[in-house]
Image (tube, rainbow, N blue to C red):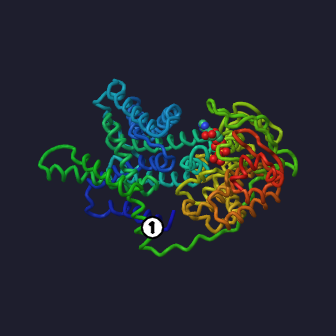
Amino acid sequence: MTPAHRILAGLALLLAVVAPLLPGFPPFWVTLLSYIGLSSLVALGLVVLVGVAGLTSFGQAMFAGFGAYATAILTTRYGVSPWATLPVALAISGALAWAIGAVTLRLRGHYLAIATIAWNVSFFYLVGNLDFFARNDGISGIPPIRLPGIDFGQPLAFYFLVLGFVVLAILLTRNLLDSRTGRAVRALRGGALAAESFGVNTHRARILAFVYAALLAGLSGWLYAHMQRTVNPSPFGITMSIDYLLMAVAGGVHNIGGALLGAAIVTLLRDQLQSFLPWLLNAQGNFETIVFGGLLILLLQFSPRGIWPHLARLAARLLPAPAPAPVPPPAEAPALPPRAQPARGSEVLRASALTKRFGGLVAVDGIGFALNAGEVVGLIGPNGAGKSTTFNLLTGVLAASGGAVTLLGQPIGGHSARAIAGRGVARTFQHVKLVHGMTVLDNVAIGAHLRGHAGAAHAALLLDRAEEARIFALAWQQLHRVGLAHVAHLVADELSLGQQRLVEIARALCLDPVLLLLDEPAAGLRHLEKAALAKLLDRLRAEGMTILLVEHDMDFVMNLTDRLVVMNFGAELAQGRPREIQANPAVIDAYLGTAA
Ligand SMILES: Nc1ncnc2c1ncn2[C@@H]1O[C@H](COP(=O)(O)OP(=O)(O)OP(=O)(O)O)[C@@H](O)[C@H]1O
């Protein structure tokens, strides 16, 4: 959180607490503020789901409905106290979200969005047509929430109850996002391939974001039922789900502050437009919906990240610039336990008769080689020779059509990318895959995912701080190692391509790998950057690291590697020391004649 964000948040909280207590503050506005709070809870969930995890849901009103109907039925038919229904309402929202997520979240992009619409529409007609849910008449007579001496049936008391839950939800969301689990969810935006390659269970991360958003929506529904004292299907239909999404997008779905701002703007604007437009047009109708549609289109055109970033920028301009973040010493927390490294010269990896067919095309054709600890081996060959495919076979991204791979003597063929990462194989990517909008330090810390254990509940309650300190000490250490500690707090997108490639190496080193696979690490680098990279890889080799790299820059490869494996049309063309390869007529004919 930048100082500008912090000051904006502080001012907003002060206003939210003081304004309703001012003499003459209209009671209707207190109710309006409660509505803003209720919508904020749902929009906060959308920050995690849409803004952070990149999953679009048009089903949040349904999850609010789960919470609302759960408490409505339990309190009116079974006489359960409202406070006792809260955990039940949350459990029902969470469990149903988990079940729905398990079958729906394998879909991607617009298919996922359509599926959430289908769920919400089904729910709407289900509660509207079943006697159990009192059809469209709804369930009334829901009791107010009470505590000894406080009747939350009173609008002002209810508002402060909602405000308390919103503040709690903000803190929980912040803790969650600022944790190992939060980084795993954020890693989804860098692509599932990169996340899985560092041990993130991407399906579980998606479900977690989905369930968390549903829990906040369920909480909002529970509060709503006790505010209205009656529930019926209309506030839980698809129109309301679209409204929630509109709030989050309008405010800024990438920021917690944006969700709150969006909820406030849309709720207030709707209220004002509902009275102003019929007066202006001298006719009755839902004209505000048309205005909202137009505003959303304009917003998506001119400010797709919402209003919040503009507000934060304005606040930053009005405030003194913060001092640059200090660079702490690399190891201020106890180190994470290191992985046992193989003895120098011992075999780390062996690929035998490795084959990959894509339909009729044999992309990798029975290739075989071994890598020994402390060696830097280059995998070279013309474009389309099958180098990246070989990388993907070694790292479990693709399943081989034939052949075997062993790591430290154990077969890893058929293992998932996650499992292979767990055994100590770390990689970088031909096309850099860092998480946009995330700092360099956070990006690097994703590499340590498998070295931590804290889950979502630990993170939300801040019980993960000791482990987090160790993970960040490690991330700092690796950034120092690649010479990038001075840019640790910059957003990764701001770095040059050469620096981004080094960040990927630092992230890979966080895994404490036994084998490092680098896919075209020198591509797009300037001369000095290449020299720095060569120096770094040299140093890693001296420390005993085993490295396999794919690279087209022959000067770089020939000066750095101990051995080379040359591929052509998927098959092995030659293997040997750089000098032997440079003198090999077949290699000169097929590749070096053009590449050198
Ligand atoms: N997923 C895929 N489906 C079908 N064909 C593929 C797939 N991935 C790679 N190929 C094909 O396999 C062959 C080898 O591709 P690969 O990317 O492994 O080559 P490369 O040696 O890494 O090339 P470059 O140096 O250009 O990156 C190419 O003909 C490519 O078109």
Q: Left or right: 409 with respect to 98?
A: right
- Residue 388 in view here: no
Q: Left or right: 550 with respect to 19?
A: right
Q: Left or right: 554 with respect to 145?
A: right
Query: For the point 77% across and 42% down, which residue is it?
Result: 573
**Disc 1 on helix, strand or loop?**
helix
Say whether mark 1 is within 8 Å of ligand 1.
no
Q: Residue reaching furthest bottom?
A: 320
Residue 74: quadrant of the picture: top left
Identify the residue position indicated by label 1 in the image.
Answer: 7
Instruction: Indicate whether 511 appears above or below 16.
Output: above
Query: For the point 61% across and 66% down, which residue is it?
Result: 487
**47 and 507: which one is in front?**
507
**42 and 476: which one is in front?**
476
- Residue 65 in view here: yes
Where the C terminus falls, by quadrant?
Answer: bottom right
Residue 285: quadrant of the picture: top left
Q: Position of residue 272 (x, y in %)?
A: 23, 54
Residue type at tag 1: Ile
Q: Position of residue 296 (x, y in %)?
A: 32, 51
Query: For the point 33% across and 54% down, which residue is it?
Result: 33
Q: Position of residue 246 (x, y in %)?
A: 36, 48
**526 and 312: which one is in front?**
526
Label 1 Cα neighbours within 10 Å, binned few <14 / some 14-19 / many ≥20: some
Instruction: Indicate whether 396 appears above or below 498.
Output: above
